[in-house]
Structures are given as structure tokens and as C-alpha cells.
């Protein structure tokens, strides 16, 4: 099978808000945008945003590796998201994980290289 492209789909009740969140927070590039399906490219990966979401909290499996998880968590909140598990030090090392939720209820991780 020849795979042409891989994208990960999340749901959105408010398409414009979701596209702006991923574009602005992660410095993404909008590849396509309409009320049914939008696409944002982030670091070479494509996030597909499907309309019709209900805003319920849903674990996505998405993880974004960043240099500073503490700063990243602050930026998530500033962009309109939430932090459901604050970054915490582990064994005296800087935090390596934060659980976050986008404005549409899609839960994702911020992590740093260990």
C-alpha cells in the first residue's frame, strides 16, 4: 500500500477557534480550512480538525515535544487551553510532562526530551 500522507484527527465544535489555537500556539501552517475539515501542519505533522465536535474532554494521544514544559504549559493557557496535570519535577530534574486540553476538549501532552 502506498501511503500518501498521515494525519491525526481531533474534533472541534468551533472550527475557527481550534484552527487558531493549533496555528498560533504551535506556530503551525494552515493547509486547509472549512467548516467540515481543516488541516494544520506542525513540525512536519498534520493535525486534521473535524467539525461537529461536542466539546467533551477526550484523550487524543497527541504529544508535542518542547524545550521547556513549564513555559509551554503557560503558553497553552494563554492561548485559551487548560492544563489538567501541572508539570512537576521528578527526581530533582526539570518537569518533563504536562497534560493539557485545547479549547475544544481534546487532551494532549507536552513533553521534553529526556
Image (cartoon, grey):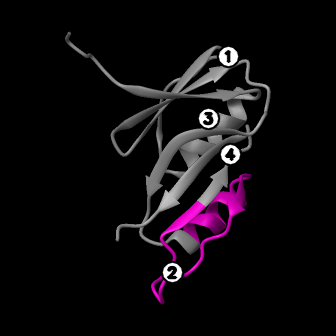
Q: Secondary structure at mark 4?
A: loop
User: Which residue corresponds to mark 3?
Assistant: 19
Crowding at dot 1, Cα within 10 Å, few <14 / some 14-19 / many 20+, comes out as some
Q: Secondary structure at mark 3?
A: helix
Numbered label attached to residue 35: 1
Q: Earlier in the sequence, mark 2 or mark 1?
A: 1
Residue 81 point in image, percent of width and height:
71, 52
Query: What is the span of residues highlighted in magenta in the rendered image?
Result: 71-98
CA distance for labels 2 and 4: 25 Å
Can I make out residue 27 in this image? no
CA distance for labels 1 and 4: 18 Å
Q: Earlier in the sequence, mark 1 or mark 4?
A: 1
Q: Is residue 12 left or right of residue 69?
A: right
CA distance for labels 3 and 4: 11 Å
Q: Earlier in the sequence, mark 2 or mark 4?
A: 2
Residue closest to the eye, 33 or 8: 8
Q: Secondary structure at mark 2?
A: loop
Q: Earlier in the sequence, mark 2 or mark 3?
A: 3
Residue 56 point in image, percent of width and height:
78, 34
Amino acid at each position: 500500500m502506498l501511503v500518501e500522507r498521515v494525519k491525526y484527527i481531533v474534533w472541534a465544535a468551533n472550527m475557527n477557534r481550534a484552527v487558531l489555537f493549533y496555528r498560533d500556539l504551535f506556530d503551525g501552517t494552515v493547509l486547509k480550512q472549512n467548516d467540515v475539515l481543516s488541516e494544520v501542519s506542525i513540525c512536519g505533522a498534520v493535525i486534521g480538525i473535524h467539525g461537529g465536535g461536542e466539546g467533551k474532554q477526550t484523550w487524543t494521544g497527541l504529544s508535542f515535544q518542547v524545550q521547556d514544559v513549564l513555559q509551554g504549559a503557560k503558553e497553552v493557557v494563554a492561548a485559551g487551553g487548560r492544563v489538567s496535570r501541572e508539570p512537576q519535577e521528578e527526581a530533582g530534574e526539570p518537569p518533563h510532562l504536562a497534560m493539557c486540553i485545547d479549547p475544544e476538549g481534546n487532551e494532549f501532552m507536552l513533553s521534553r526530551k529526556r
